[in-house]
Image (spheres, helix red, strand yellow):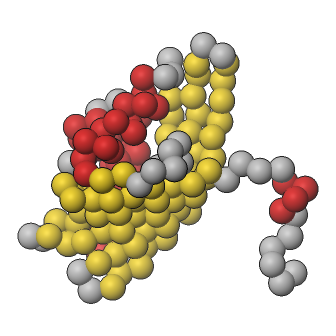
């Protein structure tokens, strides 16, 4: 596995670990201050670290316990830019019961001063009635 792919995969795992520990400051350390992105919980575009802090806080404050997991992380490098795509799951326990939210996501990384920083995040939920989507286009 190429070095960049290993580095980006490790960052993704570190972000998930920090989220599971509720360590928002550590999560944000992997993001660039000028980031932009989309959350799975809001339609509006997010700008900057404070918007990301609010998004992470939103989830963490609404659950008694939570676990964030990644699966099938793929990394593609384009010079000083890399794109990571993955599937994600959040398992949470709230006052209304236990919930699982699944989806897919991507991070765009840029290498700045030798460090990879996330400059764009896009998360979308993948919950839908399976009978509506039982085949892929072209099948």
Residue 49 or residue 103, whichever sits in front: 49
Residue 71 or residue 33, whichever sits in front: 33
Vertical arrangement, residue 108 with respect to residue 27, above or below: below
The image quadrant that residue 96 belongs to is top right
Asked if one can make out residue 70 in the rendered structure from this viewpoint, the answer is no
Q: Which residue is painted at 29% across and 63% down in the image?
A: 119
Give the left or right position of residue 137, taking residue 96 as reference: right
Q: Position of residue 121 (x, y in %)?
A: 40, 59
The residue lying furthest to the left in this view is 113
- The mark tally for this picture is 0
The image quadrant that residue 132 belongs to is bottom right
Give the left or right position of residue 99, taking residue 110 as reference: right
Asked if one can make out residue 81 in the rendered structure from this viewpoint, the answer is yes
Q: Position of residue 4 (x, y in %)?
A: 30, 74
The image quadrant that residue 79 belongs to is bottom left
Q: Position of residue 50 (x, y in %)?
A: 25, 42
Q: From the image, which quarter does the N terminus lie in?
A: bottom left
Q: Which residue is painted at 58% across and 19% down in the image?
A: 94
The residue lying furthest to the front in this view is 44
Q: From the image, which quarter does the C terminus lie in?
A: bottom right
The residue lying furthest to the right in this view is 131
Q: Which residue is painted at 83% across and 50% down in the image?
A: 129
Q: Which residue is painted at 21% across and 48% down in the image?
A: 29
Give the left or right position of residue 37, taking residue 112 as reference: right
């Amino acid at each position: 596995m190429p070095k960049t792919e290993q580095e980006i995969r490790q960052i993704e795992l570190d972000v998930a670990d920090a989220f599971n520990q509720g360590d928002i400051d550590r999560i944000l350390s992997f993001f660039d201050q000028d980031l932009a992105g989309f959350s799975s919980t809001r339609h509006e575009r997010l700008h900057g670290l404070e918007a990301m802090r609010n998004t992470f806080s939103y989830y963490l404050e609404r659950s008694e316990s939570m676990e964030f997991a990644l699966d099938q992380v793929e990394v593609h490098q384009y010079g000083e830019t890399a794109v990571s795509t993955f599937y994600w799951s959040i398992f949470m326990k709230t006052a209304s019961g236990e919930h699982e939210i699944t989806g897919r996501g991507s991070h765009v990384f840029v290498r700045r001063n030798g460090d990879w920083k996330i400059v764009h995040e896009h998360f979308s939920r993948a919950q839908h009635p399976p009978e509506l989507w039982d085949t892929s286009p072209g099948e």
